[in-house]
């Protein structure tokens, strides 16, 4: 494409669909989340090539404009993308534009959308301990008159909390931009979405210690039900500070 005719999303899709080296096209980001795109949203597109294939499309490697952001990878690289990594959620909710592998592209995306049983269990253990650590520090700092530190620790705890709750449901945590979108369409088991989001919003904004303690009682219940009592019990008497007074 010339400077007068920049590469567009539609043009790239047409080129890729006509190229036998391309086995899949996968759209991620705001354009793949119904109702989330804006006039500023570009098209984030994975171009998946057959392993060891040769194609002229590689000349677009690294292409990035206000309209089109391309990632050109082999099928082998696509299978590994986000496993683990920050890209996992984006691919878990991506849309398939082209699948020449009789559903294999769809199966790869499905694998990214669900954590393995052991992977989820081990991840949840780590996130639970991190959540408890930040929560404990926040409550302790609030008790000791360290309001600024208490607020920062409370905000930190929310990140770990969300990672934990999604790991318990064997799902990658959505980016903050898509958290409400995700929960509106795919609620977490045993959680009221509006109540959870209100608590997350208020704790992030104020560090409210009473609300943190209330939320912890809910987390403790679901974490123990999931087999993570050992992680919590390791906190010993410090759990008393985290629970409602």
Image: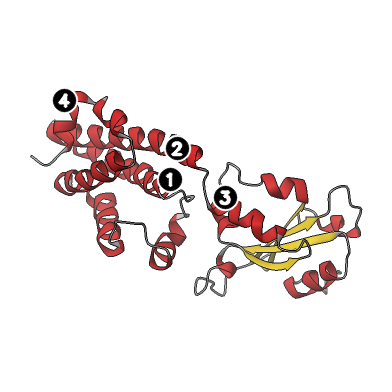
Secondary element under disc 3, as helix, strand or loop, is helix
Mark with earlier residue (1, 4): 1
Write down the residue under mark 3. Answer: 88
Kindly report the distance in space between the C-alpha atoms of the residues bearing marks 1 and 4.
26 Å
Determine crowd level at label 4: few under 14, some 14-19, many 20+ residues with C-alpha closer than 10 A. few
Dots 1, 4 in contact, CB < 8 A = no
The picture quadrant where one finds residue 90 is bottom right
Is 205 left, or right, of 62 in this rendering?
left
Which residue is denoted by mark 2 in the rendering? 123
Q: Nearer the viewer, residue 12 or 95?
A: 95
In the image: residue 74, left or right of residue 65: right
Q: Kindly indicate the quadrant of the structure image that contains residue 192.
A: bottom left
Quick one: 52 or 151, which is closer to the camera?
Answer: 52
Residue 145 seen anywhere in this rendered image of the structure: no
Query: Where does residue 106 sit, x and y in percent of width and height?
Result: 66, 61
Q: Earlier in the sequence, mark 4 or mark 2?
A: 2
Whole-Å distance between the Cαs marked 4 and 2?
A: 24 Å
- Among numbered discs 1 and 2, the one appearing first in the sequence: 2
Question: Closest to the observer: 187 or 146?
Answer: 187
Residue 44 lies in quadrant: bottom right
Residue 38 in the image: x percent, y percent? 53, 73
Task: Confirm whether residue 178 shows in the render.
Answer: yes
Helix, strand or loop at mark 1 = helix
| Residue 193 point in image, percent of width and height | 31, 62
Of the image marks 3 and 4, the number of the one nearer the N terminus: 3
The label on residue 69 is: none
How crowded pointer 3 is (Cα within 10 Å; few <14, some 14-19, many 20+) is rated as many
Pointer 1: what residue?
A: 167
Asked if the residue under mark 2 is in contact with the one under mark 1, i.e. CB atoms within 8 Å, the reply is yes
Q: Which mark is residue 237?
A: 4
SS type, badge 4:
helix
Determine the CA span between mark 3 and mark 2.
14 Å
């Amino acid at each position: 494409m010339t400077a007068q005719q920049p590469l567009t999303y539609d043009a790239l899709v047409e080129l890729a669909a006509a190229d036998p080296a391309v086995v899949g096209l996968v759209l991620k980001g705001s354009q793949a989340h119904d109702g989330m795109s804006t006039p500023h949203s570009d098209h984030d597109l994975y171009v998946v090539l057959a392993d060891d294939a040769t194609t002229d499309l590689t000349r677009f490697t690294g292409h990035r404009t206000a309209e089109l952001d391309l990632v050109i990878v082999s099928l082998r690289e696509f299978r590994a993308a986000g496993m683990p990594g920050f890209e996992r959620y984006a691919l878990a909710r991506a849309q398939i534009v082209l699948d020449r592998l009789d559903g294999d592209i769809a199966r790869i995306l499905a694998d990214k959308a669900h954590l393995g049983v052991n992977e989820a269990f081990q991840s949840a253990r780590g996130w639970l301990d991190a959540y408890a650590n930040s929560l404990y520090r926040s409550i302790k700092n609030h008790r000791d008159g360290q309001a600024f530190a208490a607020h920062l620790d409370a905000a930190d705890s929310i990140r770990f909390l969300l990672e934990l709750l999604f790991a318990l449901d064997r799902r990658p945590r959505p980016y903050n931009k898509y958290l409400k979108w995700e929960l509106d369409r795919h609620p977490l088991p045993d959680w009221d979405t509006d109540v959870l989001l209100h608590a997350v919003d208020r704790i992030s904004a104020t560090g409210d210690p009473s609300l943190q303690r209330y939320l912890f009682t809910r987390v403790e219940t679901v974490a123990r039900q999931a087999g993570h009592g050992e992680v919590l019990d390791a906190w010993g008497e410090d759990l008393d500070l985290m629970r409602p007074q």
